[in-house]
Amino acid sequence: MGTHTVSSFQLKGKIFDKDGLLVKEEVLVEEVPNEMVYGRFLGKAAWKDDRTFEVVSKTSQWVGSIMVD
């Protein structure tokens, strides 16, 4: 989920269980907004393994991840 305000851009990841209950929510990145911010951080989102969810940028080396305990 991306949140864009006048002062910041946040990309958050939310993990839900099979019943739809929120397990974990984490800010993956927070930046000062500009015209290139979305393209730099949006990319492929997938489970790396049973405990790690990743978002991998299409245009840079950036990777955001959430670890589930």
Image (tube, rainbow, N blue to C red):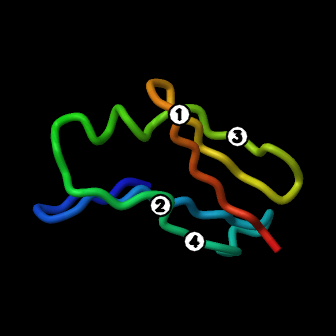
Q: Earlier in the sequence, mark 2 or mark 4?
A: 2
Q: Earlier in the sequence, mark 3 or mark 1?
A: 3
* Residue 55 left/right relative to 18: left
Separation (CA) of disc 3 from disc 1: 16 Å
Tag 1 residue? 61
Q: Amino acid at mark 3?
A: Ala
Q: Secondary structure at mark 1?
A: loop
Q: Secondary structure at mark 4?
A: strand
Residue 3: mark: none
Q: Earlier in the sequence, mark 3 or mark 2?
A: 2
**Residue 66 position (above or below residue 49):** below
**Residue 2 position (above or below residue 39):** below
> How would you rate the neighbour count of disc 2 (Cα within 10 Å): few for under 14, some for 14-19, many for 20 or more?
some
Residue 63 locus on image (x, y percent): 58, 44
Separation (CA) of disc 1 from disc 4: 23 Å
Tag in front: 3 or 1: 1
Residue in view at x 43 percent, y 58 percent? 29
Residue in view at x 59 percent, y 43 percent? 55
Tag 3 residue? 46
